[in-house]
Image (cartoon, rainbow, N blue to C red):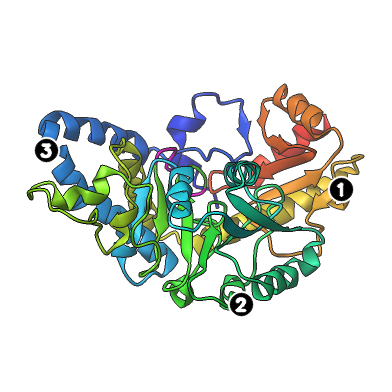
């Protein structure tokens, strides 16, 4: 089944383009066009008072959607920011310096670059667990988490450079011996792609994600689930974290913070992404389309594509170059092929109006609910011609 009829505005802009990069910038459903206009009209109608609507309706609705999709017990544990990097910096500001960090060698550039820079400045000591071989990664991460003290354990639910998915988040988090250690799961490639229940770890781990990919909401809408009792007073703080105090006279003493996730709020931001996010979530609910159903649809297309691709018997681009290898079943919503000429292949396919991308020597190809088997057949035709 295809849901292309809900993406007409995006797809019609270039009907010849075959967009197979849902993992990069997922097309927005048509309902987001009206949502974007709604944000503008609310700002015009309410002017300065638009923030009352944001705090009273828009943000609480978005929090409820996140809570519902992730099995979280309380919407008050969810806060928002324009990007995940801002939230990571706020988390880091809660930790001692130098910060002892356990992470992997397959984190997205934003965190990986920041961690390297902190090392250069003597502000962090970083231990990285290699992703490969994938068959033993989970055990090796568990061992590293158990074996020494860290201030921060940071790892991805789905690796951005391979699609490899962590099968058991709970086990890694349970392995961290010190209760005071911050545990952060980067769920950007997992949220709205893999069915995820955070209820067992809601009181112990942070979860970080956003709307640019599988939540189909574009940029500017990222969120953080904040377990109670962790990071109660971020040093990196914005005035929105004190929004509830603005009507009161200044008080001497410590800077005040709210007890809920609003303690991680920053400063003024564009709320349009939240309107889009809420509209997409309402659409999915109206269609009765769960994350499990979305995942099943994408997995079916992945399997069909790999079978078709192998039948073409092309040199290089086939299941033999798949990363992780085919026997590793835990993967997200994109397929990764390790090719020495990945950049050249990407550009060659772009001349055939196929939108994919690569990261180093890894070509990435991702399906979504705006695809069906006809799209896969067309993709294979353009690859082979």
Which is nearer the N-term, disc 1 or disc 2?
2
Residue at point 65% right, 42% down? 120
For disc 1, the neighbor class at 10 Å (few under 14, some 14 to 19, many from 20) is few
User: Residue 381 sits in which quadrant?
Assistant: top right
Among all residues in the image, which is located at the extreme top? 351
Nearest-to-viewer mark from 1 and 2: 2
Residue at point 24% right, 59% down? 258
Label 1 residue SS = helix
| Predominant SS of the magenta segment | loop
For disc 3, the neighbor class at 10 Å (few under 14, some 14 to 19, many from 20) is few
What range is drawn magenta here? 214-220
Q: Which residue position is annotated with label 2?
A: 175
Query: Is residue 311 found left or right of 222 in the rendered image?
Result: right
Quadrant in which the C terminus is drawn: top right
Label 3 residue SS = helix
Residue at point 68% right, 53% down? 163
Give the alpha-carbon distance from disc 1 to disc 2, as whole Å.
44 Å
Nearest-to-viewer mark from 3 and 1: 3
Label 2 residue SS = helix
Nearest-to-viewer mark from 2 and 3: 2
Which mark is on residue 49?
Answer: 3
Point out residue 91 in the picture as x, y percentages from the top left corner: 45, 54
Point out residue 119 in the picture as x, y percentages from the top left corner: 64, 46
Point out residue 318 in the picture as x, y percentages from the top left corner: 85, 46
Q: Which residue position is annotated with label 1?
A: 311
Query: Is residue 196 found left or right of 256 in the rendered image?
Result: right
Give the alpha-carbon distance from disc 2 to disc 3, as whole Å.
47 Å
């Amino acid at each position: 089944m295809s849901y292309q009829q809900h993406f007409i505005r995006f797809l019609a802009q270039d009907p010849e383009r075959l967009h197979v990069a849902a993992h990069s910038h997922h097309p927005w459903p048509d309902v987001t066009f009206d949502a974007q206009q709604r944000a503008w009209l609310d700002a015009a109608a309410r002017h300065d008072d638009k923030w009352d609507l944001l705090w009273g309706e828009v943000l609480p609705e978005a929090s409820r959607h996140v809570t519902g999709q992730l099995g979280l017990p309380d919407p008050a544990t969810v806060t928002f920011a324009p990007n995940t990097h801002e939230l990571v910096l706020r988390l880091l500001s809660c930790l001692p310096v130098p910060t002892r960090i356990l992470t992997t060698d397959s984190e997205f550039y934003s965190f990986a670059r920041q961690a390297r820079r902190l090392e250069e400045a003597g502000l962090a000591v970083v231990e990285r667990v290699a992703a490969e071989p994938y068959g033993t990664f989970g055990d090796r991460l568990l061992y590293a988490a158990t074996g020494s003290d860290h201030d921060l354990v940071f790892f991805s639910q789905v690796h951005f450079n391979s699609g490899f998915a962590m099968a058991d988040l709970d086990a890694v988090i349970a392995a961290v011996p010190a209760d005071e250690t911050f545990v952060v799961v980067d769920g950007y490639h997992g949220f709205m792609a893999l069915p995820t229940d955070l209820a067992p770890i809601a009181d112990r781990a942070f979860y970080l994600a956003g709307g640019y990919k599988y939540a189909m909401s574009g940029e500017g809408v990222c969120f953080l689930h904040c377990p109670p009792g962790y990071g109660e007073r971020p040093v990196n703080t914005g005035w929105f974290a004190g929004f509830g105090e603005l009507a009161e006279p200044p008080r001497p003493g410590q800077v005040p913070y709210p007890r809920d996730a609003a303690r991680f709020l920053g400063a003024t931001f564009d709320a349009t992404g939240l309107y889009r996010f809420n509209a997409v979530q309402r659409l999915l609910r109206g269609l009765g389309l769960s994350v499990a159903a979305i995942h099943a649809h994408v997995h079916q297309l992945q399997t069909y594509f790999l079978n078709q691709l192998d039948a073409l018997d092309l040199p290089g681009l086939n299941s033999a170059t798949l990363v992780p290898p085919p026997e590793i079943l835990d993967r997200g919503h994109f397929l990764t092929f390790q090719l020495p000429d990945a950049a050249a292949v990407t550009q060659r396919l772009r001349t055939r109006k196929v939108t994919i991308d690569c990261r180093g020597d890894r070509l990435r190809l991702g399906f979504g609910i705006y695809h069906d088997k006809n799209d896969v057949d067309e993709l294979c035709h353009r690859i082979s011609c």
